[in-house]
Image: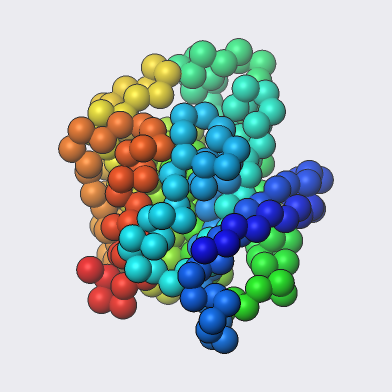
Amino acid sequence: MRILEMNVKLTRLGRNRRIRVLLPDSYESDSRRYPVLYMHDGQNIFTIDVFGGGGWHVHEEVRRSGADVLVVAIDNNPDGDGTARYREYCPWRSPKTVNRKLGIGEQEAIGGEGWGYLASIVEDVKPLIDQTFRTDPGDSAMAGSSAGGLISLCAACRYPHVFKRAASLSGAFWLAQEDTEKLAEESDLSILERLYLDIGTEEVTGAFTAGNYLTSNRAVNGLLAEKGTDHRYLEIEGGTHNESDWRARFADVLKYLYDEQGE
């Protein structure tokens, strides 16, 4: 496997961003086109330049899963002690109760740039990847954890014709719970090929407790189930909110996303 680095302009946000591209083992010896998985928090995906609490070692998990997929890891915006990341990964402004529970001053804006971030992936990042590498432009997916899980679900709702597979691990839907539920309820997800959600039973972020995480994710799962969306939802017993836990289950997530039988 090879991991390449590139820079791209996120036009809607007016920012440059580093991306890292994992080419699968067979890429050099095969002439076929590959599906692409777009992931957030790119600093953590391959443990090259870690942001936060560690790395996923996704290159190893891709190999372990047997998935023949090209992975594009998009760095997050680390400015503002994480607040800039929250702004890009949430389409709506969070209520001030979220600031208080995260220990962030109420003058700081949390959320609000998510649609621009997703549009930049569709309009800037994806065309660059499809032009540079031997991809299947019609087979794109998105995955992320925490706030990255929220924006991945949003991508599936807003762009189901682009991202036909999506995975939200430990989704921080509480960043904008009412808006997230409304989006899930109103979106037509019938053309999605795979949608995966999970949550650990021991997840904590700031003053957001494991109970908050479970209640939040159960509400979104319930809405998806009521409208008949074909998806997988798991509660991970003992699962906590960190990269080592996400890595431990990521090979199985990949198998679900890319196995034709969805097993």
Camera sees residue 241: yes
Q: In this view, does 176 lie to the left or right of 234?
A: right
Question: Residue at left 66%, top 16%?
Answer: 107
Q: Which residue is drawn at 49% across and 76% down?
A: 26
Q: Residue at position x 35%, y 68% from top?
A: 66
Placement of 41 over or under 8, stated as above or below: above
The count of marks equals: 0
Residue 79, image x, y percentages: 69, 28
Q: Residue at x 65, y 31 (%)?
A: 78
Residue lying at the far left in this picture: please name it: 237
Tell me which colouring the rendered structure shows: rainbow
The image shows residue 166 at horizontal and vertical percentages of 43, 60
Q: Quadrant of residue 129?
A: bottom right
262 vs 210, nearest the viewer: 262
Q: Is residue 210 above or below residue 161?
A: above
Residue 212 percent across, percent down from the top left: 31, 28
Relative horizontal placement of residue 73, taking residue 188 as reference (left or right)? right
**Can the viewer see residue 118 in this picture?**
no
Q: Residue 230 at what x, y percent from top left?
A: 29, 66
Position of 215 with respect to 115 (left or right) is: left
Tell me which corner region of the image, top left, top right, bottom left or bottom right, holds residue 125: bottom right
In the figure, 249 relative to 34: above or below?
above
